[in-house]
Image (tube, rainbow, N blue to C red):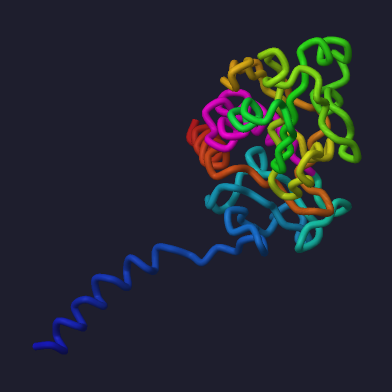
Amino acid sequence: MATVMCGARRALINPMRSQYRSLTTLQGNSHIFVFPNPQAPNSHILSLLRTEPPNPELAIGVTSKLPPTTDSLKENPKFLETLQSVISEHAHEDPDVISQAQVMASTSGANLGSGGVFFSPQRRQSRRGHGAASLGEDSSGGASSQGGVGSGGRGGWIHVSDSRNPPEYGRIASPEDIFGSIEVDGQGNIEGNYQPSGTYRILTKNGILGLSPFLREKLVHRLRSQESS
């Protein structure tokens, strides 16, 4: 009887397993799937979706090398648009961004290792039109102390940054790692008003697309919605 039951279990389980195909993921990035590019035999499509064949319109981009390099990856502009749209809509809900804003409020505007920097609205207005990444000092300098929450209770802006290359404490993330900036009030509450940096790159020498778990989930959900529409 035991033999019969064991065989019955295998009969039930194996058909289910046969429905799934082993997917290839990017080394060190289990959430990024790699597919052969039917339009170019020597290249691959990178996507956050498991769907095969992948939709090029929803893919991260196409690369002629694995692992991809800054020279081999061709970014998908439509993916970048979707990425920025998702961050704009959901960054204020991201636990990492909320924590960053609260720490800023309790440390008088000191910069966080995650790449956020608090700077005053006055400083921002004086440099309007140059992108959010240019609002603070460059990555080789420290964060501006002007307008920090602990300085007269004024509000300011923090950077929302890629996690692939966290800067040292007290410094700002590189422009290519900054998604954009979001406004915070004098008590560290996020007010919204997200501004894209215009300088973000999906792939740098330090890695590829490092979103927080929260924002990655929101992005995948948006891509799935676009896929089914």
Q: Quadrant where the N terminus lies?
A: bottom left
Q: Nearer the viewer, residue 59 or 216?
A: 216
Look at 78% across and 45% down and name the residue there: 167
Residue 208 position within the rendered picture, expressed as x and y whole percent measured from the top left: 73, 50
Residue 147 position within the rendered picture, expressed as x and y whole percent measured from the top left: 76, 17
Q: Nearer the viewer, residue 134 or 46?
A: 134
In-image side of 186 versus 227 (left or right): right
Look at 58% across and 37% down and name the residue there: 96
Image height check: is 47 above or below 193? below
- Is residue 85 located in the magenta-colored stretch of the structure? yes
Q: Nearer the viewer, residue 136 or 65?
A: 136
Q: Nearer the viewer, residue 69 or 109?
A: 109
| Tally of numbered tags | 0
Q: Can you tell which quarter of the image residue 182 is in?
A: top right
Look at 81% across and 10% down and name the residue there: 122
Residue 210 position within the rendered picture, expressed as x and y whole percent measured from the top left: 67, 47
Image height check: is 85 above or below 218? above
Q: Main secondary structure of the magenta part?
A: helix
Look at 50% across and 37% down and name the residue there: 221
Which contiguous range is marked in magenta? Answer: 75-100
Image height check: is 152 above or below 3? above
Residue 38 position within the rendered picture, expressed as x and y whole percent measured from the top left: 69, 55
- Is residue 96 located in the magenta-colored stretch of the structure? yes
Q: Can you tell which quarter of the image residue 188 is in?
A: top right
Q: Residue furthest left?
A: 1
Q: Can you tell which quarter of the image residue 205 is in?
A: bottom right
